[in-house]
Amino acid sequence: MRGSAISFLRFLIGIDGHSVAPDGFGQSIADDIRFARNFRLCRRVAIAWRIPTTVEMRALDLDQLIGRFGELTIGLADVAGRRWIVRERDWHGWPDSPRFVFFAMEDSTVWAGADFDLWPSRWQWPPEWTKSGITL
């Protein structure tokens, strides 16, 4: 019994050597916990987001990973050597996913990733969106 429990735990945290199903982006529970912890840290940082350029927006839309989450990149920031990205979904709220998806990318590796509905109070909404009347 003990061996099967250890095997199951190794499977959950992604160290059992078995391949991960191709849904999501192949993260383990340990990755999910790390992403959640890192997102909590990111929410505490004061950020003035900026609107992506057309070239940046196109690159993110075509990105194999990021392009699958959300329909519109609404904010970019470069923080501590990482590219922070917020995308918005057209369809959100129960029973759909939360309105926003956040990624902090370190080169091509996801350092943090999370879905959220409430815009963090320390994050400044891009001024161009505020002027156009778009609200949170």
Image: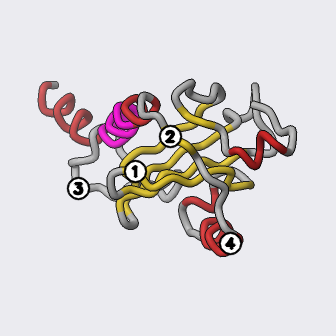
Tell me: residue 59, above or below residue 9. below
Q: Residue furthest right?
A: 133
Q: Quadrant of the C terminus?
A: top right
Most foreground residue, 63 or 18? 63
Q: What residue would you read off at disc 2?
A: 47
Q: Quadrant of residue 17?
A: bottom left
N-terminal of the pair, mark 2 or mark 3, is 3
Q: What residue would you read off at disc 3?
A: 17
Helix, strand or loop for disc 2: strand
Q: What residue would you read off at disc 1?
A: 79
Helix, strand or loop for disc 3: loop
N-terminal of the pair, mark 4 or mark 2, is 2
N-terminal of the pair, mark 3 or mark 4, is 3
Which mark, by number, is residue 58? Answer: 4
Q: Are marks 3 and 4 in contact (CB under 8 Å)?
A: no
Looking at the rendered structure, the kind of residue marked 4 is Arg
**Circle 1: is it few (<14), some (14-19), or many (20+) Cα within 10 Å?**
few
Helix, strand or loop for disc 1: strand
